[in-house]
Amino acid sequence: MRNRFLPTLATCIFLFFGTSCRQDEPVPPASPSSPAPAMLRVAYVVDGQPLAFDTLMYTNEGGTVYSVTHLEHYLSELVLIGSGGTPNDTLHGPWYVNAANAVDLDLGTLRAGQYSGATMLLGLPPALNVTGALPNTLANINMAWPDPMGGGYHFIKFEGHFMAAEVPTGFAMHVGKNEFLPVCTMLGSFTTTGNGGTLKLTFNLNEVFRTPHIYDLNSGNYSMGSMALMGQLRDNCANAFTLEYLP
Amino acid sequence: MKHQLTLLAGAIALLLAASCKKDAEDPAPPGTPGPAPIDLAVPWYFPIMDVPADNPTTREGIALGRRLYYDTLLSASGPMAGRSCSSCHSQALSFSVPGSPPGFLQVLPHVNLAWSSNFLWKGEVQGTLEDIMRFEVEDFFSADMNILQNDPHYPQLFSQAFGSATITQDAVDKALAQWFRSMISSNSHLDQYLRNEIALTPSEQNGMMLYLTETGDCFHCHGLPLTTDHDFHNIGLDSTFSGADQGRFLVTGQTSDLGAFKTPSLRNIALTAPYMHDGRFATLEEVVEHYNSGVKHSASLDPIMTKPGKETGLNLSPQQMADLVAFLHTFTDPVFLTDTALASPF
């Protein structure tokens, strides 16, 4: 009894201490097969120039000089379109982005695959475009689309100044309501590694004024409440993004 | 053998008791309970309140901050000697005061600042409530910690709130920040309406529709429920700018910030006259009249203020303006103005 009991007890003690404080131990490095987290980055440019706020220095398709003072928006339902046997991969979001202090957003895991392009909502899907559907963060509350005007949220607020007959004048391009939700298409193939990386979206603000409607700020500097202007912005924003994968 | 087993069991027990000590909090000594955490009463339709992890809100912290807020001891050694926070922030006036000392802008009310990260009219301080309290205690009041340390009451109060009787600038900032987080106005008629507890009068209802639609377009900067976007805007008070009227520009140096000031909360706005950073408007009717017909153009005028056909104002009818003022009166919160928990402890 003595010869067998004590070694057994010692083993139990060893095993107990070997496992009881596991949370204090360093986490072992991820195995090569564990996918690393992927990030979503949004960059803002004006025809190739990085966006600089508050300076009247950009010229849009209509020949109007403008500046950007404020830009915030949602993104959601990013669908990576599979090719070569890769199925589509949908990343739902939503993601709120303020261009003045845009940060990389956590996408979770992104599987390996070949893709021919992507689609994305510049805004929120109808199920989330309902007052109170998003958590009551300050950002979400400031993006609210008032209930008397239909409720939900602004999809985008894009504000600045432009030169109107040599006089600086404000513009506020606000888009909301489901019927004006921009569905963006991004062409171009890319291959994800399955080991993290970054999906980089580039938002070319001049596209908001370009295709298919040449948007004239002089005849429409304030979109909220205007079905015609929000319709133009919906169509133009659909072409405003490009996407690339950074391994 | 039996003795050996007893010793071994005892050793195991001791080892177990000691081996995971870092996983558990050291228990407080008997008789000295720690500060009691408080869940502040925040309505469901309010924004989520971010509280710094290193300054959780506690009953003792709020009580200490409240005492400091009302105590002239905070200023005893500085240029503001004889004054407390409450000297310029009267509860009955939504923790504001009419007029302002020479050289100062109008006193902004202390209401719902827990959700702000831009402080003072020009945003001279940005960050958390702890950051603005650091400015107020250190720069505005030039508070002397030794004076508080030598007071017969404060060391014990700090000990109860923060576990140490040694009074530091950091602890004072934190106590005041906790107190400010508790200064929540959420029982106005508007709140009761939002909670479906009351109905608004027809005039108030009409005013709300103006406020929340493009007709009045108040909501872009004064959205509900906080009635401020905490941002900075040039609302067309002037077309040229000098001195303090340059606003946020004096902080950033950006010409696009000329004439821009922080969006003030409209909570209890009927009690915080005169209005604007310089108190140029005596009544709410004058304020509405400014938005209706007095907007002045400048290169930094906020884009929201430049709707087609409304470049100089909203063009509201007299009845619409009266309705809008009626709605602004629903922001008055009698509970906040009379709550004894927010009153002086002295």
Image: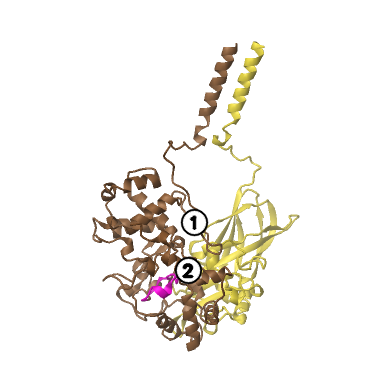
Chain colours: A yellow, B brown
Left/right of residue B202 with respect to residue B292 in the rendered view: right
Quarter of the image with the N terminus of chain A in it: top right
- Residue B121 left/right relative to A15: left
Is residue B188 positioned above or below B156 on the image? below
Q: Label 1, secondary structure: give it.
A: loop
Q: Chain of mark 2?
A: B
Mark 1: give few (<14), some (14-19) or many (20+) Cα within 10 Å: few
The residue range painted magenta reads: B259-274
Q: Which mark is residue B229?
A: 2
Give the left or right position of residue A1, taking residue A40 as reference.
right
Q: Chain of mark 1?
A: B
User: As shown in the figure, which amino acid type bears the numbered disc 1?
Assistant: Leu
Q: Is A232 one of the magenta-colored residues?
A: no
Query: Do the residues bearing badges 2 and 1 touch, measured as CB atoms within 8 Å?
Result: no
The residue mark sitting in front, 2 or 1, is 1
The amino acid type found where label 2 is placed reads Asp
Task: Give the image location of residue A199, x and y in percent.
Answer: 60, 57
Magenta segment: does it hold B271? yes
Does residue A191 appear to the left or right of B53 in the view shown?
A: right
Residue B188 x, y percent position in the rendering: 49, 70
Residue B202 lies in what quarter of the image? Answer: bottom right
Q: Please identify the dominant SS of the magenta region.
A: loop
Q: Residues within 10 Å of mark 2 (few under 14, many from 20)?
A: many
| Residue topped by disc 1 | B40
Q: Earlier in the sequence, mark 2 or mark 1?
A: 1
Closer to us: B336 or B212: B336
